[in-house]
Image (cartoon, rainbow, N blue to C red):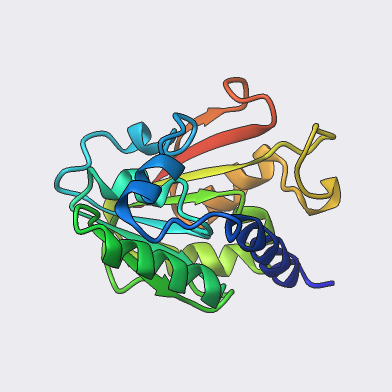
Amino acid sequence: MRPHTTLLIVTLLFNLLACEHDHGDKEGIDEHYSNPRHGQFQNLFGDLSNKIIAEIGAGLGYDAIPMARLAKRVIAIDIDTASVIRLDSIAGADTTLNLEARLTAHDTPGLRPAEADGVLMVDTYMFISDRPAYLERLSKGMKVRGKLVIVDFKKKTTRFGPDVNYRVPVYEVEQELKKAGYFVEEINDTSLENRYIVVAINQ
């Protein structure tokens, strides 16, 4: 099974679970996304008020929606049509959200030239088939000095998460970022039990 196909299946399974609850109204949205673990990476981008942040692999919007309450605009990007439709519906139901849902193909970031001040990728990087080419395309969609935050599963057996064979070791992420022309600002593989965090700057 190809990696991007696996990502699509995982996303669809999460969507099926989410359908057990109706979050089409603002009250339901607030309740569903009030968990403090949701949006836990937004502080890595600093003050969001004048920034456009893109989340690639936004899925159910657990990070995109909390950020959309603070940022100038959040672009929630995904390859799954159902996820994008759902996020678009949430944005329409809550006018306090500066949220745009955007569908893209698995091999393209889906950003316009120099569009994003920052990009967040959570549990997504490992499923990109041609990461060096993807990082180069992503760089073009980011502003100079824009911040890229990659959060992904450690290359080891954990209590939950995808098969270890799909995971990318953090040193490999660092090498690929540097080769694509990014400056690796920070690597944190201790704060989270199952995941590492890599922060890079677009040059």
Q: In the image shown, does 175 or 25 lie closer to the viewer?
A: 25
List x then y, in percent, for residue 40.
44, 33
Q: State left or right for residue 150 relative to residue 15.
A: left
- Residue 42 seen from this side: yes
Q: In the image shown, does 15 or 196 lie closer to the viewer?
A: 15
Give the residue at x 83% y 45%. Answer: 164
Residue 156: image quadrant is top right
List x then y, in percent, for residue 64.
39, 51
Q: In the image shown, does 103 or 169 lie closer to the viewer?
A: 103
Q: State left or right for residue 89 relative to residue 47.
A: right
Give the residue at x 38% y 50%. Answer: 29
Residue 48 lies, with reference to residue 2, above or below; the image says above
List x then y, in percent, for residue 128.
64, 64
Residue 152 lies, with reference to residue 57, above or below; the image says above
Give the residue at x 61% y 49%. Answer: 123
Q: In the image shown, does 180 or 101 lie closer to the viewer?
A: 101
List x then y, in percent, for residue 86.
45, 68
Q: State left or right for residue 118 relative to residue 154.
A: left
Quadrant holding the N terminus: bottom right
- Residue 109 seen from this side: no
